[in-house]
Amino acid sequence: MRLSTKFLLFNFLAKGIILLVFLAASPFVLRYFAIKSTDRQLFEKKEEVMAIIDAEGMENFISQENPELGFGSYNILKEEYILLEQVPQLYDADLIFVEDRILDDESVTYRVYSYAFEWGGAFYLLEIGRSLQTIQEIESIIFRILLGTVFLFFFLSFFLDNAFNKSILRPFAQIIDKKLSHIKEPQQFSYKAIETSTEEFVLLDESLSEMMRRIQKAFNQERIFISHASHELKTPISVLQTKVETLFAQEGLSEEQMDKLMDMQQTIQKMKKTVNALLLISKVNNAQFIKTEEVPVHEVLEELVEDWEAMAAEKNIQLNFKGAENYILKDSNRSLCLMMLRNALVNAIKYTPQYGKIDIEGRRINKHYRISIHDNGPGIAERLLQQVEEGTVFLKDVDKDKSGFGLQILNKVALYLGVKVEIKSNSSGTVVNFEINY
């Protein structure tokens, strides 16, 4: 799972749990404060009634002629009421409670404030009530508002956190993409600093650059050694080849001596081939070839097929050229491009059995130009392909007649030219695909 996804999930879940706890507690909190507010209003109403009694007397509420009738008043919607009646004794009443009242055959639940007091030598009981239905409706409205706010918060929080995570982690993604994921050779590494204000990412960028400098130094030392060693070996190999050719010119050589000289010449040829391959790989690794040419890939394929058609015919191999769409590869090198494709075709011809078949095609697929060389030979061993991909110079566990340099050169040249190589191989054949972005 990506780091940005983990951050996003953590923030989302953490906020979600907090908001869900708040949402679950909100009905109780709302009811608590609603009840407190109602009690305060009831107390204020009681104070207003008592102020009126003190100022104007009890006659505004209870008639002196019929005090037993008391006083009762409900508003139109039955949301509030006031009851005042004379009682025979002074109750110990100064409390608030909830009570159901039947009004016009309808049960209404009230929050009631009961207050007993003495006035003018008589005892009175004052009750002021307020319907809880109003409180419940207000609670329902506020709860729906809170619920909508929570969902809106979740929605906005998710997208804002996602945008923030992407923004804050963009330099990290750039470091991974530009300095790690697509780097197959040290010389491809870019030492340009990634723009970021995060100290940890700056430190990571600097550490990677410093590490790559050390790696590149070690690689350069190895390549210089291979290059110098190859150059130094060319001279003694040429001398040995000259001496063997001189010995061939001598008369009176026995058949056994001729066989030994032939073995020596074959060994020298293999050494020469190895040295030339090492020199070529070294030059490609050290970027000693210019890439300023415009290469018509379709023409290169046609030229390649024409040059090797005769060799395929000698082995009774059907070289099936399906054609190539026109494509110009810019900022490249024609000789290297030809060498890359030639190595793939030569390997196919070399290891395809008699009466076999090789298909060659070049066409546009989506935003790529793909060159495909498909044979029905015995296939390439997986361990060999793995070693070539890993950049091993001298391959292990390969047959004596297979050096693997052709595949190595193919991969190194493709990497240098910016061409993606995909090799699929099994017992029924090998497919080499070259993909060029355009």
Image (tube, rainbow, N blue to C red):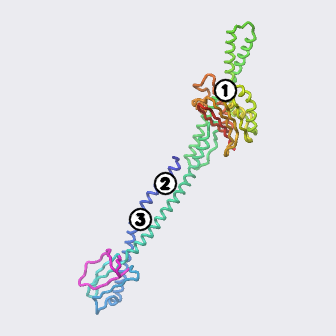
Circle 2: residue type = Asn
> Looking at the figure, which quarter contains the C terminus?
top right
What is the spatial separation of the Cα atoms under label 1 and label 2, in whole angstroms? 65 Å
Q: Earlier in the sequence, mark 3 or mark 2?
A: 2
Hey, which residue is sitting farthest front in the picture? Answer: 355
Circle 3: residue type = Ser
The secondary structure that most of the magenta stretch takes on is strand
Q: Is residue 337 above or below residue 396?
A: below
Q: Front-most of 208 and 316?
A: 316
Q: Which residues are magenta?
A: 80-108
What is the spatial separation of the Cα atoms under label 3 and label 2, in whole angstroms? 22 Å
Q: Earlier in the sequence, mark 1 or mark 2?
A: 2
| Residue 406 x %, y % | 66, 29
Disc 3 target residue = 26
- Marks 3,2: beta carbons within 8 A: no
What is the spatial separation of the Cα atoms under label 1 and label 3, in whole angstroms? 84 Å
Circle 1: residue type = Gln
Number of the label disc, if any, that sits on residue 354: 1
Q: Earlier in the sequence, mark 1 or mark 3?
A: 3
Q: Secondary structure at mark 3?
A: helix
Quarter of image, res 177: top right
Disc 2 target residue = 11
Residue in the picture at 46% in, 57% down: 16
Residue in the picture at 71% in, 28% down: 312
Hey, which residue is sitting farthest top in the picture? Answer: 252
